[in-house]
Amino acid sequence: MKFITAAIIMAGLIINAVADVRYRGNAVHPDYPNQCYYEDLKQPIPKNQSFSPINLEDHCERIFCRSDYVLVMEYCGRHNLAPNATCSIRSDSRQPYPGCCPTLACENESNFI
């Protein structure tokens, strides 16, 4: 049981290590009552629901509308990924957050002669 608890805590720490969070209060718009409004994308979001844009460059994030009209915006944290001869930085804007975050993709090296 202790192992499972420790594994859950470690998984939470790893997930939090790759994500950053911002908050934006009073996210309302008169045309969208009882919803939050994400001004950057002109997107209404129902209270207690999330929105993850796809197919938008530079918008790899998940936006949650709290019941008090505060937006909780999770996005890819800063990274220090460094491409080299066999590795490149890739991201896929077709995937919802966090699948759209940059990753280091390396070619498999082969020792076959």
Image (spheres, rainbow, N blue to C red):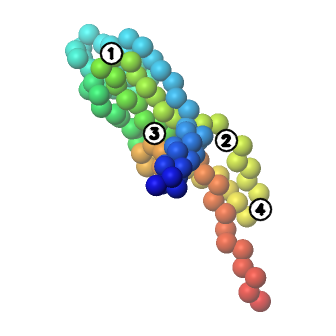
Q: Earlier in the sequence, mark 3 or mark 1?
A: 3
Amino acid type, label 2: His
Q: What distance separates the C-alpha of mark 4 from that of mark 2?
A: 19 Å
The structure residue drawn at horizontal position 74% and vertical position 86%, both measured from the top left corner, is: 112
Q: Earlier in the sequence, mark 4 or mark 2?
A: 2
Can residue 77 be seen here? yes
Q: Earlier in the sequence, mark 1 or mark 4?
A: 1
Question: Does the CB distance between marks 1 and 2 fall below 8 Å?
Answer: no
Task: Compute the Cα span from label 3 to label 1.
Answer: 27 Å
Mark 2 Cα-neighbour bin, 10 Å: few <14, some 14–19, many ≥20:
few
Marks 1 and 2 sit apart, C-alpha to C-alpha, by 32 Å
Label 4's element?
A: loop
Q: Amino acid at mark 1?
A: Asp
Nearer to us of marks 4 and 2 is 2
**Direction bottom: furthest residue:** 113
- Find disc 4 in the rendering and name its residue: 85
Question: In this figure, which residue is indicated by the disc labeled 2?
Answer: 79
Of the residues under marks 1 and 2, which one precedes in the sequence?
1
Residue type marked 3: Leu
For the residues labelled 4 and 2, say whether their Cβ atoms are less than 8 Å apart.
no
Look at discs 1 and 2 and give the one toward the viewer.
1
Give the residue type that dot 4 points to: Ala
Residue 14 x %, y % = 57, 46
At which x and y percent is residue 101? 54, 45
Would you name the residue on which mark 1 appears? 68
Task: Tell me whether circle 3 and circle 1 mark residues in contact (CB < 8 Å).
Answer: no
User: CA gap, disc 2 to disc 3?
Assistant: 20 Å
**Residue identified by numbered label 3:** 56
Up-down: is 26 above or below 5?
Answer: above
Which residue is drawn at the image coordinates 40% and 30% (left, top)? 63
